[in-house]
Image: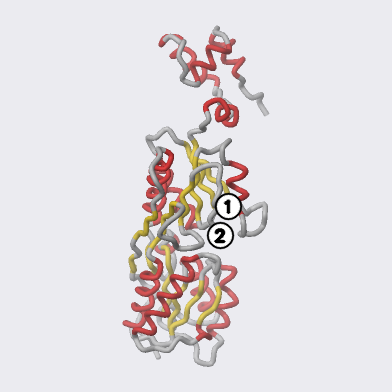
Amino acid sequence: MSRRITIHDVAQAAGVSVATVSKAINGRDGVSPATLEHVQEVVARLGYESSLVATSMRRRRTDVIGVLVAEFEPFAVQLLQGVSSALHGTRFDVLAYAGSVSAGEHLGWERRSLSRLGGTLIDGAILVTPTTMPTETPVPFVAIDPSAGTDEGPATVSVRNEEGGFAATEHLIALGHRRIAHVRGRTDLASAHQREHGYRRALEAAGIPVDPTLIVDGGYRAAATTAGAHALLELPDAPTAVFAANDLSAMEMIRVAGERGLRVPEDLSVVGFDDVPEATAHTPQLTTVRQPLAAMGAEAVRLLLAMLGGEPNEQVRMPAELIVRGSTATPAR
């Protein structure tokens, strides 16, 4: 491994003092334009990078926004792309950090992450699906898809989950389905409860009784959906349609159905939620409720930069849109 370039190496190569290099790279006065240009050329040629921690201690800022997630999965990756695009052309860089990988569990990951990074590595944070809403933090933060829906307090960006769950279920009812199952999301997140409530409300509006045996846990994960998918399809009066709380669970539902000899949508209609890129690459293409994930990431950036500029917190709810594709059809029975 090659040796790390230091500020002393830059000073020697540029023929100036360490103090002059420090002033040049930190934007302080006392350096002529010609010397500044020369030092910057040497810095670029040598590939020198100052320590982020040391810089933050001197300047009391890092110009880095942290995107903190429990794990890297399609939902978080799409949001991250929106964050990155929104920060293009600003002075800020992005640090993506997975907070529950080492801990091995979701609960409390956001507090650990903010404690490790806040104040030394990042100026502010975007928390993706936090399990709790921290009250005292070292840096401002915006929560995307928080654990509890709120109209006040911390800054949040969420989608109209209940309306999306209602639209997904209403679509299946309009096709003629009456035995409609639901694969729940993570029970520690408000979004999962809101989507289930939309499912229940649509059934009730159509005069269809809610059958508890048709509701199973999926936890927003494919692996957590498998057992529930099998249980639904083993029922004596199995469902003809399923609304899954996210696309990963919906695609696992389709996989299990195929494993059991069922065709989608001929034998079983399936609707997801999110509209991750895999939804259109899937066979059949997945009918789903689209969250504007990239726009949500960009909106979180807007809120956070406003907060860093002294503006008050905001709570933003974005629309959910039903996207009909090839995984739903009229029931065969």
Query: From what the image shows, is residue 181 above or below residue 117?
Result: below
Taking the image as shown, residue 157 lies to the left or right of residue 54, namely: left
Position of 30 relative to 269 (above/below): above
Residue at coordinates 53% horizontally, 92% vertically from top-left?
A: 236
Provide residue 120's location: percent of width, then percent of height: 58, 35
The outermost residue toward the left is 174
* Rendered-image quadrant of the C terminus: bottom left
Residue 61 vertical position relative to residue 328 in the rendered view, above or below: above
Q: Amino acid at mark 1?
A: Glu
Secondary-structure class at tag 2: loop
Q: Please name the residue that numbered disc 1 is placed on.
A: 110
Q: Is residue 269 left or right of residue 216?
A: left
Q: Earlier in the sequence, mark 2 or mark 1?
A: 1
Identity, as a three-letter code, of the amino acid under mark 2:
Thr
Using a 10 Å C-alpha cutoff, classify the residue at mark 2 as few (fewer than 14 neighbours), some (14 to 19) or many (20 or more). Answer: many
Residue drawn where x is 55% and y is 53% of the image = 134
Locate residue 26, reporting x and y percent: 50, 21
Q: Which residue: 57% across, 9% down?
A: 17
Disc sitting over residue 131 in the figure: 2
State the colouring used for the structure image: secondary structure
